[in-house]
Image: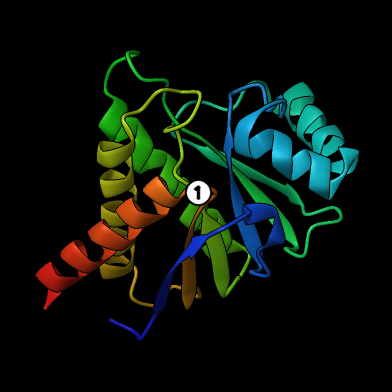
Amino acid sequence: MAERIFKVVHGDITQEETDAVVNAANSLLKHGGGVAGAIVRKGGEVIQRESDRIVREKGPVPVGSAVYTGGGNLKARFVIHAVGPIWGEGDEERKLRSAVRSALKIADSLGLSSVSIPAISTGIFGYPKEEGVKVIVDEVLNYFKENPDSTLKEIHFVAIDKETADLFSKFLSLLSAEEV
């Protein structure tokens, strides 16, 4: 597997200087609260307008998939909107893995070298934090095992709260150690 940098960031995803940030989105791409709201507040209404156009033209984004817009005023050039599951809707782990994989595929299709990923679905969507973070880290590592020629070289796991950042660190070290 190509050498990749995995970094845990305890901070604001809207400050990330990666090529893209992943947004924890809903199917209608209405970015009102949580990570999505912060991204639009910092990146500007252009992100919401592009999102509205996508939904108008293609319909709601299915759970487990992703689309992208420009980054507006963010340092990142793109926002990849990954739609994770709402806890309790059923088949959540598969859907969360699919959302993560879809976001990484989009980053690869754009030829990006770096992306920042939050703890998708673990906020207002209610996915238990510890379980969700483990699934996200595991799926990122699986993606690179299956896609060794990915253009992505650096992945940031970003959390505004220390608890989630610590979980990212824990599972990144545990799951990476299993690789060796």
Q: Is residue 172 above or below residue 165?
A: below
Considering every residue shown, the one lying at the far top of the view is 89
**Label 1 sits on what residue type?**
Pro
Considering every residue shown, the one lying at the far front of the view is 162
Which image quarter: residue 66?
top right
Q: Is residue 112 above or below residue 13?
A: below
Which image quarter: residue 23?
top right
Residue receiving disc 1 = 118
Considering every residue shown, the one lying at the far bottom of the view is 3
Residue 162 position in % (x across, y down): 44, 51
Residue 141 position in % (x across, y down): 29, 63
Residue 173 position in % (x across, y down): 23, 68
Camera-side residue of 61 and 173: 173
Camera-side residue of 4 and 41: 41
In this rendering, position of residue 172 left or right of residue 159: left
User: Is residue 174 visible to us here?
Assistant: yes
Q: Is residue 78 above or below residue 131?
A: below
Residue at point 79%, 58% (across, down): 74
Q: Is residue 138 above or below residue 175?
A: above
